[in-house]
Image (spheres, rainbow, N blue to C red):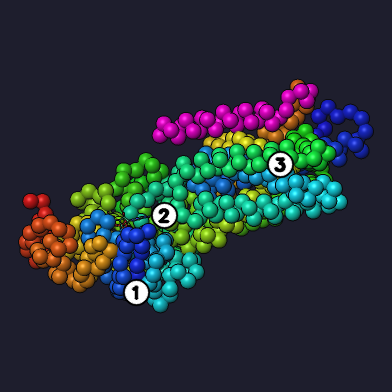
Amino acid sequence: MIEIQNLTKRYDDATVVDDVSLALPESGITAIVGPNGAGKSTLLSMVARLIPSTSGRVLVDGLDVQETPGAVLAKRLAILKQNNQVGMRLTVSELVAFGRFPHSGGRPTVEDERHIDEAISYLGLDDLRNRFLDELSGGQRQRAFVAMVLAQDTKYVLLDEPLNSLDMKHAAAMMKLLRRTADDLGRSITVVIHDINFASIYADHVVAMRDGRVMLQGGAGDLMQEAVLQDIYDTVVQVREVEGHRLGLHYL
Amino acid sequence: MTVGARGNWDFVLPFRGGKLLGLVLVAYAVATATVLFQTVTQNRILTPAVMGFDSLYVALQTALVFFLGTRDLANVDIRLRFVLETVLMVAMSMALFHWLFLSRQRSLHLVVLAGLVFGVFFRSLSHMMQRILDPNEFIALQDMLFASFNAIDRQLLAVSTVIVLVTAWVSRRLLAKLDVLMLGRDAAINLGIDYRRVVMMLFAVIAVLVSVSTALVGPVTFFGLLVASLAYQAVGTDRHKYTLPAATLVAVIALVGGQTVIERVFGFDTALSVIIEFTGGLAFMLLLYRNLKR
Ligand SMILES: Nc1ncnc2c1ncn2[C@@H]1O[C@H](COP(=O)(O)OP(=O)(O)OP(=O)(O)O)[C@@H](O)[C@H]1O
Ligand SMILES: [Mg+2]
């Protein structure tokens, strides 16, 4: 379990994450939703020790992320940030191979190769594995990065907007794939999502943030209420039931 | 080493051997410092020299004469002085590097600008101290600073070799981590790299290598940039297993080949550093131009 205790992040005078306490469960999919600037990415970055918190702490299976050696955490927790560019020219399979670094230390074994191949097929990148990243479309590149994070083979996976630049088909495929990863491999996957309908259909738990605070935690049913959504997003969202799923219509 | 040699071999071999060793050491130091620096700072335009860190070394040398006087310094073994200067250099540049690259995320433009300002600042500081110096001390200092490709400081060869071997060992151990660093800070931390520690270690290595090359042949601004860019182009991969040796190789070819040609063809009339700086400067402008277009 990842325990987030009274986590706060302040930049000068602006408090962007404000005394957040949360528990991310051992398994299943947790969706974090909320408007732009709510502090979702900042929260994930602190959980993954990429930035220090102003106060509060984060425990991953009881290990304080600021004090535990990075190499230990890298085998338990992986993060994919919202914007990913790399400064070097890499092929898809080279990128995915980097995901094995915590295990291989730069010298991949047969076992590492197996993980790399699996992650690449899992994301449907077999045909593209020898392409350079700068020769891919935005969505293909996004899938390559997800493959890298899955190859890291950690119990906890944090994904900041993995649906970024994916088309309808690939967005749904990505959510199904995450669902499968969580179910089959017993991983705990936390995703930041803007499309509340994906959260409604695929997530086991939902966390809604606004202005650095947690507005709601619970099941998808708790989120998909017109009044609740209006509160979080400041906009009118009609909720309809379609084939047993509650879907929000926000286009009108 | 043997091209056009005439006369007493007992003189020729140690003389040219020393010169060759000096050039190889400088080639390794400049090439490695540049590639490491570009990896850590994630850019292909800045080098320690462009950022003015060899000027810092000259400023340190000058400051030592200024504050201690040459009479005291003359009693100190030149090798000991070199080690002392290197230690000072590592301390100062680590503080600067830390401030520029680790204390918070700064834009590349700001860093370039700060580097250029540092360079000018250290140079002016050296000049100012040299102006105020007693003329006798100034002449002694000039003698100390006079290192160039034609006049490598031979007394420092042995200690430089040892230092270079140590840094080579350190960077070999960090080889796999260097590749990960190219993915950027956040990805490196995610993959379990102890980012601050590794980066500070690399900055120390870089500062030591800059000290070595500056002590042996004086400041060279664009040479590192030139050989690093050529090496990246030549090997076609960014793996440090290949780029580091390639950059050194290019540097050795340029220095040893260049020096031989100059001694044989131009009869010492032209300074190697002028040609190298000229070509390197062109490469720098080309890189800047290409970056602007993108
Ligand atoms: N380095 C920084 N310095 C100052 N303010 C920052 C910094 N990084 C983020 N912020 C501010 O913190 C707030 C939260 O940012 P964050 O990136 O966490 O939002 P988010 O919920 O991920 O938004 P989005 O949905 O747009 O990705 C924003 O108002 C942002 O401007
Ligand atoms: Mg975000």
- Residue lying at 32% horizontally and 51% vertically, measured from the top left: A142
Q: Nearer the viewer, residue B212 or A99?
A: B212
Closer to us: mark 2 or mark 3?
A: 3
Q: Nearer the viewer, residue A216 or B127?
A: B127
Chain under label 2? A
Chain under label 3? B
Query: Few, some or many C-alpha atoms within 10 Å of disc 2 (few <14, some 14-19, many ≥20)?
Result: many
Q: Amino acid at mark 3?
A: Met
Q: Nearer the viewer, residue A221 or B222?
A: B222
Q: Element type at marker 1?
A: strand
Q: Is residue A245 left or right of residue B244?
A: left
The dot on residue A185 is none
Please tell me if label 2 and label 3 are on a single chain: no
Q: Amino acid at mark 1?
A: Gln
Pointer 1 residue: A5
Residue A107 within the segment the image draws in magenta = no
A53 shown above or below B37:
below
Residue B227 spot, x, y in % from top left:
60, 37
Pointer 2 residue: A96
Q: Are marks 1 and 3 in contact (CB under 8 Å)?
A: no
Q: Is residue A154 visible?
A: no
Main SS of residues in magenta: helix
Q: Amino acid at mark 2?
A: Val
Task: Write down the region rendered in magenta.
Answer: B267-294
Label whose residue precedes the other's in the sequence (1 or 2): 1
